[in-house]
Image (tube, rainbow, N blue to C red):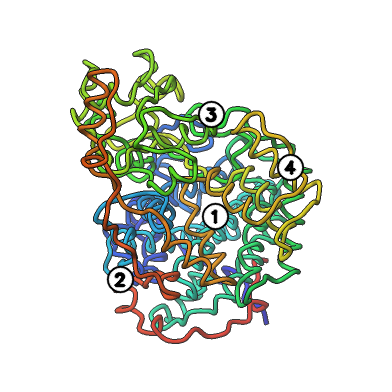
Amino acid sequence: MKRALYRKSPGAMYKNSEFHMTLVSKINVVHMKYRNIKNWLYGVLLVAGMGLTSCEDFLDRPTEDNYNTDNFYQTDEQCFQAVNPIYNSPWYDFQRGFFKIGEVLPGNYYWGGSPYLTFTTNSTDEDLVNMSASLWSVNAYCNTVIENLNTKAGSDVKQSTINTCKGECLVWKAMAYFYLVRCFGAVPIIHDNTDMISDGNYNSIYRATIENVYDYIIMTLEQAIEWLPESNDRGRIDRYSAYGLLAKVYLTKSGYGMSGSRNADNLAKAAQYAKKVIDESGRELMPEYSDIFRIANNFSDESLLAWHWTVSSYWTSQNTLQSDLAITGFSEFGDTWGGYAGPSVDLQDAFGENALSLSRNNVDVRRKATMMMYGDVYEYFYTDLGGFDYIRFVYGDYEEFPGPGSFQSPTGANEVKHLVGNMADHRAGSGTEMANMATSLSTHILRLADVYLIYAEAVIGNNGSTTDASAIDAFYKVRRRSVGAYERPSSISWEDVWKERRLELACEGDRWYDYVRWHYYEPQNAINELISQRRSFYNGLDTYYKTAYEAGSAGLDPATTYYDTDPLIPNITNNSFQLPFPATDLTMNPNLSKDPQHVDISEYTYN
């Protein structure tokens, strides 16, 4: 007998605080082992719907005074409002882990003193704990909203609305598990919160095998595809969002359990689903690469799946990445402290750049759209002041925005992606105000360009290269957008796609998972590349750049300005490709430290 999702009714809930506390308790009992209650309470309340304003209608939520789950879900609009919070709040505590795991671990970003830079992360790391808790919160949110849609939806709600809302939840649920399995390996499958509470086994559940988890993700996405429409409102998940994610899951799964090659059937499915997005979705790449990451384009066709943040009175609905990544003093709020970190020397090498040179090659526009370096000027930052001159800002020549006064980055670069700019830039792009540690800039999780490169890699498969015209076209479109006059190649190799993925998706929180995927079937090659990276820093950049800025030029003295002569080479082993479970999880459930157990995925259903 299959275990249906939410086969038990959640029971009565009450208005206002009682309504919220009942909802909290339903999720909390399963979820306590994954996070401290004070950290996740904020997000859980949003399932019920908190009052706030949004720059986009689809992020609106009902006021808490007017509804409980027994009188909510009575209209199409209310059902969509119930899903809206899953596009931001439960993901909030993942933001820092998203970047450190996705970009610092794989050597794209230098974050001095971070254990993610040196592969020394332990089970008590705050960002790891928050990341894990956030992902389990997403799963709990999705399960709870689907349960309410199944049991509470009013007779006036269209079945197509119920299906669409459940499909959106399932894609987010699949995305959460996709992160979990690539970060931690074998993890528990929590299919039904209500059943687990009723059974009382929430502190004794075992991990499912990695293959089981991938099969569960695939089953979840296949059901989402069945329910989702081909097109949806701007910014919302549609069927092609699910197809694109399914293609990425199959590409990743294709190497698991293999040695030296990948599973041909999984590669074929990755290509099949990616091709559906390319041929049938009607989506096109944005003509200008840097435009993808501007707040005015939060809901572009190129974005298949994104966290859509909003500045509100409700903490956790906002994007705070600008605070972590922007150079000191970048906004009016004094809320940026990312100056002493920056895109890595190794990533600069990949772009053909050199921080020891005062001139930029600018062959690939993605470099400037990813990292700011000496000489860079941005027309889309500080639009009210005529643009943003990076070095002019560093040395304090903006009266309204006094910079740090010295060059802080140890790598010669600071971050560009995930930044909005100042208040004027936020207003111009979204029509709304930014706030302290809060912007409404969307974080793109799956882009069309990613799907193009997934397709190219899947077609190459185990052959090393291909002359397939459709695969070359997909690769060519991505590369040509960023390097201009680029002749279409007659063949492409795995190495071509591997590097292109790095340049195209740099600092978007994805690179580490490429290494996890590679490590599945060629572990030593993945380890060797990571060990060979230039992951360290330069000495003497401030004196060099300040002299050049003040005098108009400067000669490089290699005795005072040079790359680290004794860089730390991290001890990367096969064990490095699975992060440790948070200690709090292991304390609450000792079975998480035991061998995973096979789970029959056919027992689960969403019907």
Label 4 residue SS = loop
Whole-angstrom CA distance, mark 4 to mark 1, is: 37 Å
Whole-angstrom CA distance, mark 4 to mark 3, is: 26 Å
Q: Quadrant of residue 583?
A: bottom left
Residue labelled with disc 3: 291
Residue 172 marker: 1
Residue 489 marker: 4
| Horizontal and vertical percent position of residue 481 | 63, 33
Of the residues shown, which amino acid type is indicated by label 1?
Trp
417 to 565, vertically: above or below? above
Q: Earlier in the sequence, mark 2 or mark 4?
A: 2
Residue 402 marker: none
- Circle 1 crowding by C-alpha within 10 Å: few under 14, some 14–19, many from 20: many
Q: Residue at x 47, y 38 (%)?
A: 442
Label 2 residue SS = loop
Of the residues shown, which amino acid type is indicated by label 3?
Asp
Q: Quadrant of the N terminus?
A: bottom right
Asked if the residue under mark 2 is in contact with the one under mark 3, i.e. CB atoms within 8 Å, the reply is no
